[in-house]
Amino acid sequence: MKKLLPLVALLALSPAPAHSQMDSDFSIGGAVRVGWSTTTCNAAATGAIRYNSGSGGSINFCNGSTWTNIGGGGTPAGATREIQFNSGGAFGASSTFKLTADGDLLLTGMHTGTASVPASGAGTRIFFDTQKSAFRAGNVTGTKWDNANIGDYSVAMCYSPWLC
């Protein structure tokens, strides 16, 4: 019966392609270690994965021009059990939007008198437009809930076409 060589021994016996390289350690305590080099991300490094110790530690992927964060690292933003939003590829806190695990919803902003409705035309939706201080919930046809038709400090809940 033949003995099977450990993976590390097999890798040592296999000739490495000319374009490959490894950091000085392949494993730590039996765990596979992702490279941690400071190599510049460019066409030659496309597909590379690295550990980035900055920003609390993260895993990056080289897309051929920039390192992109693909997981881990960073410091959570916002309070415990709040939904966070994507801020340039990283989680960010928002003082204007909070939906907590116990069901509280907070939307804040500045009343400007100029509507910025998040959707236009017919459809079913619920929204609060902070710029007009206007709340809408239900289903409408046509343009009833478009920017031009939203009044300051207004509330509308309806089922179209009969009640709106």
Image (cartoon, helix red, strand yellow):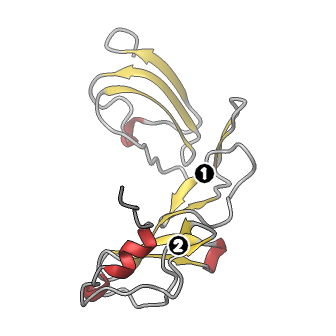
Residue, disc 1 = 84
Q: Does residue 123 appear left or right of residue 81 in this picture?
A: left
Residue 68 visible to an observer of this rendering = no
Where in the figure is residue 37, as x and y percent of width and height? 49, 87
Q: Quadrant of the C terminus?
A: top left
Q: Nearer the viewer, residue 22 or 116?
A: 22
Image spot of residue 144 (x, y percent): 35, 29
Q: Is residue 4 above or below residue 64?
A: above
Q: Disc 1 residue type?
A: Gln
Question: Toward the viewer: 39 or 83?
Answer: 39
Give, as a three-letter code, the residue at label 2: Arg
Name of the residue lying farthest toward the front = 1
Disc count in the image?
A: 2
* Residue at 57%, 45% in the rendered image: 130
- In this rendering, would 59 be left or right of 96? left
Q: Is 83 located above or below residue 104 in the figure? A: below
Label 2's element? Answer: loop
Which residue is found at the position 55% from the left and 49% from the top?
131
Q: Quadrant of the N terminus?
A: bottom left
Q: Give the numbered dot on residue 33.
A: 2
Q: Residue at x 37, y 76 (%)?
A: 11
Q: Residue at x 71, y 42 (%)?
A: 81
CA gap, disc 1 and disc 2:
30 Å
Image coordinates of residue 113 in percent, x first then y, are 53, 49
